Amino acid sequence: MFPRASIVSSRIALKVSGVEAFYACLLACVLVVSACAPPPDRDLVTYAAPAKPTHLNPLAPFHAGDTLALTLLQDTLLVAGPNGDYVPRLAQEWTVSEDARTYTFVLRPGLKWSDGMAFTGADVVFTLNLFAHPKTRSPQGRRLAAVEGYQALQAGVADRLSGVTAAGDRVVITLAAPDAGFLAVLAAGMYLFVLPEHILGGADPAKIMTNPWWLKQDVGMGPFVLSSYEPDRRLDVVRNPHFRDVVSFGRLRLVFTTPEVAAGQVGIGEVDVAPVGAVDAGVLARRAGVRVEQVESAGFERLAVNLRQSYLLDVRVRRALLHALDRPGMIRAALDEHGAVSNSAFMTGWALPQNLATYPYDPAEARRLLAEAGWDPARELLIRYRPGQPERGIVLDVVSENLRAVGVRTRLVPDPDNTGLRTGQWDLLLYGGGVYPVDPATAGPILMCDQVYPAGGNVPGFCDPEFDRLMRAGAATRDPAVRAEAYRAAAVIENAGLPYLWIGRPRMLIGVRDRVRGFAPWGDPALHLAGVAQWQVG
Amino acid sequence: MPRYLAARIGSMLLALVAVSIGLFALIHAAPGDAADVLLPLVEQGDSAGWVEARRRDLGLDLPVVEQYLRWAGQVLRGELGTSLRDGRPVLDLLLDRLVPTLQLVGVVVVGSTVFALVLGFLAATRAALDQVIVLSALLVMSVPAFFLGMLAMYVFSFTLEWLPFAGSGDLRHLVLPACVLIAAETARLTRFVRAGLLEELNADYVRTALAKGASPARAQVHALRNALLPLISLLVVGVPELLGSTVVIEILFAWPGAGLLTVDAITYRDYPVVIGFGLVMTVLVLVGNTLGDLLYRLADPRVRPW
């Protein structure tokens, strides 16, 4: 016998049971749907790309998402490897003349495009001419400015680069002046992918930027061929039957998600490889079936200083700003210690002197230097940044707080499209990237007088004739001792001149499912797929 | 009826012109343009004058009014132009992306309506459940949809591994984004169904029906039908809002809908895509409103919108 109250509640319970049944049905539906997961495709590897491709056009402005996809479809003569060395790709070897003016590349024998056509040196000659052609207007073209005949081509008195020739399996590049760092031009940063002359040879250089072939891209020298591309969604590639190596899996898919979601996806096996943030890396490292690979970045995070602003010209102000920054604290807060403070744009070990100033975190020294330089406490520094990166958001917070603590007011303004940079309305600009370890000459485009933005990547507008002389001296010879001496002296000038407030060199973290073996992380995030031919998939 | 429809179509055309002008002005008021944003790397410089040349190629160097008139001419020829980002036809892009969005929105509208009716009815007629349902709805409404989405991802994908994290491909990918949006929409609608039904249950005609011997269940069904009228309005008015929430959820779950496409288009200052999306959404909202009027007529024959 139930007391009356219990009978009442049992009636309510009976009525509620309809609702419960409704929810139970719903849950059952979810379970049934979840049980309908398709069986895993062993021949497919999925990579979560943090950056989406925009045009798949190697002639267009460099974009990490495009380069990442292009490393699957096309190839370069050589590339800057993860260990600061040059890795042969289409060229199996190369020689540099004693005077550092003539570079001879020997192509791998028997190479074929994905459509079966023979790959020859003529394709390389065609490609370099296309990049350098003034009507193409490729921002990468200027990287070939050292090649003989470049000026004549620009002036319209020649129709091709006289310094690029091919004969048999050899491609010879002759420079107008010695440049021992020229290999880095071909191998690092903005990559000069070799393009098929038999497909693009007839195209008008003036219209090639908008050629619809880029989105089709059915012929290439990369390990894969484009199968389908749904912008913002996925890019599917299938194995190139004529690739020079045997690729162990048939298909690869790039999907485009936020890094946080990508970390979750790699955690449950929805994707196989994904760059992840520092916090997510800690979670993934504790999860079965996935490991976190890491490698030092090939570039560095920095605050460029706008040296066109009179109030930033006094080097004591710049030293004060750097002393005010708690850079180890930023790396701790933003990267969970996955990185190291840097004090130079030079990253090649043999070119770095031991006596670089380290500018430790010292607010008292910062205040002293600011007072000495007569800093106006009412002045507000305009800090521009590219939005959308959580780690940089944390760095900005610390920078702002650190500078406020020494009496420097700041205003943070996003600059998603470089408008602030081009109009000169900025004092400090936070950005990162670059590929510097392979050769100290790679620092030239961000520091030399003739590279001041927009001509080149010298964003601060730094110009020191002695620095330029040393950079040219370092490039003018192949003698390692002479080069090292010149670049070390140049690094000291940069370290003292402070065109950049270097923050640090982060470590790249990549979540990798255990089924993918042989994955070797590269310091340039655009090259994470450059070693895909060596992956073994279980 | 014909006059009503003609008036509706006329106002729709006016709205489309106004929306296109508004969007055109807004996107041109933002700093930078499609040529600027395709030069992302500061280290690259712009020695070749790429930005200016690209601007000329895309016609972005023309006065804004002339750009608009050119674009409007294309629309009158039945085109929506091409994407400034990669040259693909905008209409193809939108048609391709509208299907996933409409799938998601359709499931959400149907799902949330069913849930709201059930829960609202239970809350209004079962005192024991009322507080639980009202408080639950309040709780869900207080949580932003993206947080709810992340929570759902963590629980159902990362921890339990029942459902995919993100992306698209099969029905499983639709479950989490749809459930998150259904939860949010249900919470909003349930409160209105409950309030509407309570009001109807206290109306004279219900009391009269009960006094005449109608069963409580029959009286509740009558009351529910009358309580549906504000729900129809809410659903119609709520569609634009729902499309807004869908954008956030599409980004979070990498659902390849038109919202995700448009956010990218805004980032790239790809105004043909942005305006094309605006126009299509305007049409959908206006058509939705018209359908809402017709549904209203079905639910309450006394109402004559024409």
Image: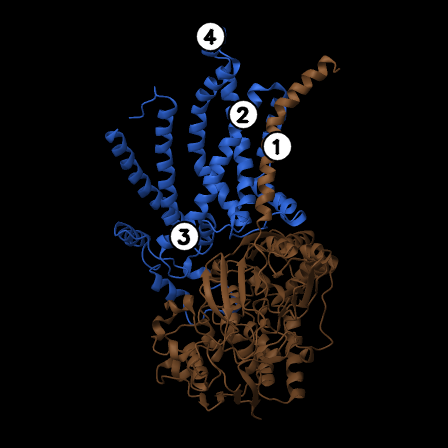
**Mark 1: which amino acid?**
Leu
Whole-percent x, y for residue B54 in the image: 38, 65
Q: Pointer 2 and pointer 3: residues touching (CB < 8 Å)?
A: no
Which mark, residue B139? 1
In what element is the residue under mark 1?
helix
Q: Is residue A149 above or below residue B50?
A: below
Answer with the quarter of the image where residue A325 lies.
Answer: bottom right
Distance from Cα at disc 1 to Cα at disc 2 = 15 Å
Instruction: Specify whether residue B132 is in view.
Output: yes
The residue that disc 3 covers is: B96
Three-letter amino acid code at the position of disc 3: Asp
Residue identifier under label 2: B120
Lower sequence index among marks 2 and 3: 3
Which comes before the other along the chain, label 1 or label 2?
Answer: 2
Q: Identify residue type, mark 4.
A: Thr
Check the residue under mark 2 and report the chain it is in: B
Query: Do tags 4 and 1 sit on the same chain?
Result: yes
Determine the secondary structure under disc 2.
helix
